[in-house]
Amino acid sequence: MATKPTFSGADGAGRPLDLNGVQVHPGRIAPDEQAALVADLRAVAAAAPFFTPTTPRGKPMSVRMTSAGRCGWVSDRAGYRYDPRHPSGVDWPPIPARLLALWRDLLPASRDPDCCLVNFYTEGARMGLHQDRDEADLTQPVLSVSLGDDALFRVGGTTRGGPTRSVWLRSGDVVVLAGPGRMAYHGIDRIRFGTSALLPKGGRINLTLRIVT
Ligand code: MD6
Ligand code: FE
């Protein structure tokens, strides 16, 4: 059973929204800061180019990925894991300072993240319902930033198959998975391609900051 999607800002811009313990902060990042983040990410992608991960069964994922920080997320025939290097063998570039500042602002009690995953969605890309559980300490929060086109974000509970709620994430929205929401199932059902002018060729970028080690 899924309820009708709401808009992230439906409760009034800036007021956090709670979906099964998952916090959505609508419009947390101002437009000029979003543009600066995109410039930071161009530098990340120049050092560590986007690649198409494959599932352990060999199926290419619809999302392209890269990472920044001490480790990055990779997936191939050997399985899902964090790895200290990009598939090409180079180190991942550092996490942009602007993202560390955002993390410290929203999560002052946590130590700094050591990994930033960068997911790129073009038209038709999606991400199936999943839990974030590849990190060593599952009590540490995960923070995500949405940039570019609108995305339909679905959040369930901590078991698969239960009721879910959906919300449209827009450019500049921040999502925090912490406390009771840390192990909630979540995913992206679809992208509304061309809804944002932030990325010149359209699409959506999602950044997730985590403490992996
Ligand atoms: C996405 N987000 O927004 C997918 N994971 O493209 C995630 O998988 C996610 O938004 C952990 C914490 C926050 C998230
Ligand atoms: Fe996730």
Image (cartoon, rainbow, N blue to C red):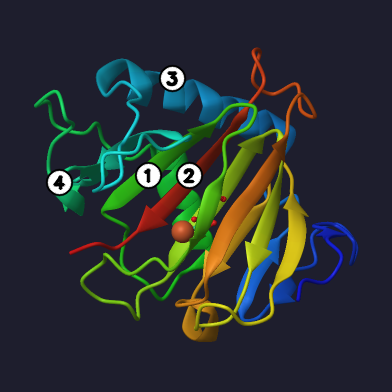
Report which residue position mark 3 lands on: 42
Mark 4 vs 2: CB contact within 8 A:
no
**How many angstroms separate mark 3 from mark 1 (CA)?**
14 Å
Q: Where's the C terminus, which quadrant?
A: bottom left
Where's residue 39, x and y in %? 50, 21
Which of these two is toward me, 132 or 129?
A: 129
**How many angstroms separate mark 4 from mark 2 (CA)?**
17 Å
Mark 3 vs 1: CB contact within 8 A:
no
Report which residue position mark 2 lands on: 207
Report which residue position mark 1 lands on: 117
Q: Earlier in the sequence, mark 2 or mark 3?
A: 3
Three-letter amino acid code at the position of disc 3: Arg
Query: Which residue is found at the position 68% from the left and 29% from the top?
Result: 32
Report crowding for label 4: few under 14, some 14 to 19, many 20 or more residues within 10 A (C-alpha): some
Q: Earlier in the sequence, mark 3 or mark 1?
A: 3
Query: Which residue is found at the position 83% from the left and 61% from the top?
Result: 5
**How many angstroms separate mark 2 from mark 1 (CA)?**
6 Å
